Amino acid sequence: MEEKARVHIFVSGRVQGVFYRKGAQKAAQELGVTGFAHNLADGRVELVVEGKAEKVRQFAEWCKQGTPFAKVDHCDVQFEEYKAEFPDGFTIREFGF
């Protein structure tokens, strides 16, 4: 059985209003990982992603660049225990505050 992983990511910089969450959703779907992305009140984007370990790592790398209009200043990636928490794929949530 292939190793599974989960990451909790906080991205700062110019990442709101530049289709970052939509780009993350597209990347997640292409990689076959599940989770969510949402904006935070302080201007960051928070993402939680689960799936095959290699695909999760690839997604985390995508987050460091983002969409063409984004300017990522910092990408904090924290690996967590896999929970199989997202049966509905990858969703974009409204503001998380």
Image (cartoon, grey):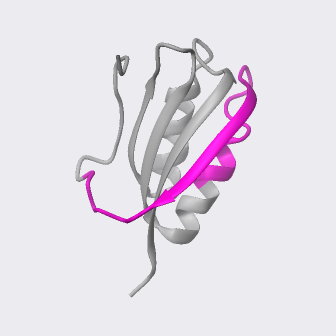
The reply, left or right, for residue 40 in relation to residue 35 is: right
The image shows a total of numbered marks equal to: 0
Q: Magenta part of the protein: which range?
A: 59-86
Q: Where is residue 70 drawn, in percent x and y?
A: 71, 23
Which quadrant of the view contains residue 9?
top right
State the residue at coordinates (49%, 33%): 46
User: Looking at the image, is 67 positioned above or below residue 58?
Assistant: above
Residue 33 among magenta residues = no
User: Looking at the image, is 16 positioned above or below residue 73?
Assistant: above
Q: Nearer the viewer, residue 7 or 59?
A: 7
Residue 63 among magenta residues = yes
User: Looking at the image, is 94 positioned above or below residue 50?
Assistant: above
Q: Where is residue 4 drawn, in percent x and y?
A: 42, 72
The reply, left or right, for residue 79 in relation to residue 36 is: right
Q: Nearer the viewer, residue 69 or 14?
A: 14
Which quadrant of the view contains residue 24?
top right
Q: Residue furthest bottom?
A: 1
Q: Where is residue 51 drawn, in percent x and y?
A: 42, 63
The reply, left or right, for residue 16 in relation to residue 7 is: right
Q: Where is residue 10 drawn, in percent x and y?
A: 56, 36
State the residue at coordinates (36%, 65%): 82
Q: Quadrant of the C terminus?
A: top left
State the residue at coordinates (28%, 62%): 84
